[in-house]
Structures are given as structure tokens and as C-alpha cells.
Image (tube, helix red, strand yellow):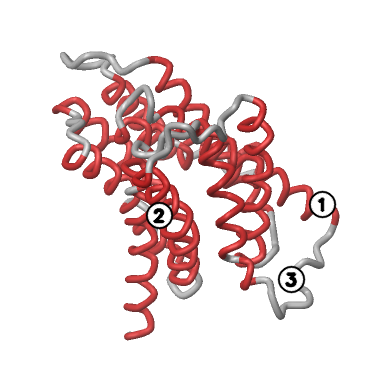
Amino acid sequence: MKTERGALASLLGGCVIFGTIGLFIRQIPLAAPAIAAVRGISGALLLLPLLLGKRDSLRFSGREWARLVASGAALGLNWVLLFLAYQYVSVAVASLCNYLAPILVILVSPIFFREKLTIRAGICAAMALGGMLCISGVIGSGSAADPRGLALALAAALLYAALVILNKKMTSPDGPRTVIQLAVSGLVAAPYAAATGGFAAADMTVRGWVFLAVVCVVHTGLAYLLYFGGLRRLPAQTASLCSFVDPLTAVLTSALLLEEPLGWTGALGTVLILGATAALSIKQKTD
């Protein structure tokens, strides 16, 4: 029982940390590709000890390596687009759009996993679409969110969905897989950041460097250790339910600390999106 409680605390801790990243990204005066590159490479270096002493940890097939590289690229581009979205829409809206990824995975599961698309999945997809319309401002009396931010966040969700699909098809252990994906994510974002002058740090203050260090050490190194450390020791359904802590934390951070209230339509959209994903995550006896 104590072991399970510790695993639950570890997983929840990782999810809470992930959910606060938008607050810190907003305080770093570097371009999104540069932040993504630094985060990926530093995260890989921090977690590199997971590979040390494991002789078989990198002995993968060519197909597995291809999936690892592709998933790492998807992760890096997901970060770039999500961080860019923070510049145009609230952290809550960007995070909720990005969190549509599980719904997208379910919708394409008949193609990639030969799974039957159920009526419940269709209803949940419709709920998520309604939630998206609510948080975007299309439904309700609130002002519409910037379409550039919405487009960036939705593109990030597509890449997040690609990452989930690739992860489902891989057999490599979590530790080595995470290190490789983080390294690739940084290497993918770095050339774009360099070409666009994203690494120019003329406007960086001590505060900016501190927040960047927190993103690298806490939101990447520590958060991944906590998340995967708890994930390995918990049932899949428990882990799925805990994953909702991430977007909920982002919504609360946006509203309470960044003063970006969602309004009643945004709150309804949050309930619809998270409710739809929860309904898909919880395996019922009738399935």
C-alpha cells in the first residue's frame, strides 16, 4: 500500500509540474524554438544516467530507432508550437487544445491499431469538439481567441497525437526511450532556432535565466523522473485518471496566477474536453 501511495504521489507530482510550465515559459524572453532546444538537450543530459550501466539499453532494431527519432522530432515540434501558442492565447486555452490529442488518437485508432470506433468514442469526440468551440470563444458571449494561437495549439495536438501513436508501437524501455526522445527533440528544434536568431539572449535577464533553468531542471529532468517513476508502479487506469491533473493545473495556473480567466463558456469547454477524455480513458465493464 505504501509503495502504491508513493508511486501515486510521484506521478501526481510530475503531472502538477508539467501543468505549470506555461507560467514559466511566459517569463523567458527567448524564442520558442530556442527554449524547446535547450529543454530537450538539457533534459537528455540530466536523464542520461538512466542509460549508464545498461548494456542492452540501446540495442534496438532499425525500425525501433526510426520510431524513436520520429517520436523525438514530434515531441520537439510539439513544444515549439505549444510555446508559440502561449504568445497568442491564454495558457489554459493552449493547454486544453493540446490536450485534444487523446481524442485524436482514438479517432485514428481504427487505422493505426485496427480498433473499432465505438458509439461512445463518437459521442466523446463530439463533446471535445463542443469544448473546443467553447474555449475558442466561437460559442458564448466572450471574445474569440486569437486564431493564430488556436491553430498553433491544434497543430501541437496533432504532433502530440503522433507521439502517442509512435510510443504505442515501440517496445523500448521508458528510460532509454525518454532520453533519446528528449535528445532528438532538442536537436530538431536547435537548427531552426539558430537559423531564425532564436538563441539571441540580448533581452535575457537574471530572472529569465533562472526561469529557463527551472524549465530544464524541474519541468524536464525532475518531472520526467517523477512521472515515469510512478507510472511503472501503477495500474493503467489510475495513471490515465492522474493525467488530468496536468491540464487542470494549467487551467488553474492561467486563471489564478496569470489572471487569464476562462469565463463560463471556457469553464464549460474545460469540462467537456476533460470529461470526454475521461470517458474514453475509463474502461467500463460493458466494453
Residue 177 versus residue 244 in the image, above or below: below
Residue shown at 19%/42% (left/top)? Answer: 257
Q: How far from the left and from the top, in percent, is residue 277?
A: 38, 43
- The image shows residue 100 at horizontal and vertical percentages of 43, 36
Q: Distance between the residues labelled 3 and 1?
A: 15 Å
* Marker disc for residue 124: none
Q: In this view, does 32 lie to the left or right of 211?
A: right
Q: Name the residue under label 1.
A: 63
When the figure is inspected, residue 134 is found, relative to residue 254, above or below; the finding is: above
| Residue 74 vs residue 41, the one in the foreground | 41
Give me the C-alpha separation between circle 1 and circle 2: 35 Å
3D distance between C-alphas at marks 3 and 2? 28 Å
Is residue 249 left or right of 220 when viewed as pictured? left
Residue bearing the label numbered 2: 214
Q: Earlier in the sequence, mark 1 or mark 2?
A: 1
Quarter of the rendering containing residue 2 = bottom left
- The total of numbered circles placed on residues is 3
* Circle 3 residue: 57
- Secondary structure category for the residue under label 1: helix
* Residue at horizontal 15 percent and vertical 27 percent from the top: 263
Res 24 seen here: yes
Mark 2 residue element? helix
Which amino acid type is shown beneath numbered disc 2? Val
Location of residue 56 by image quarter: bottom right
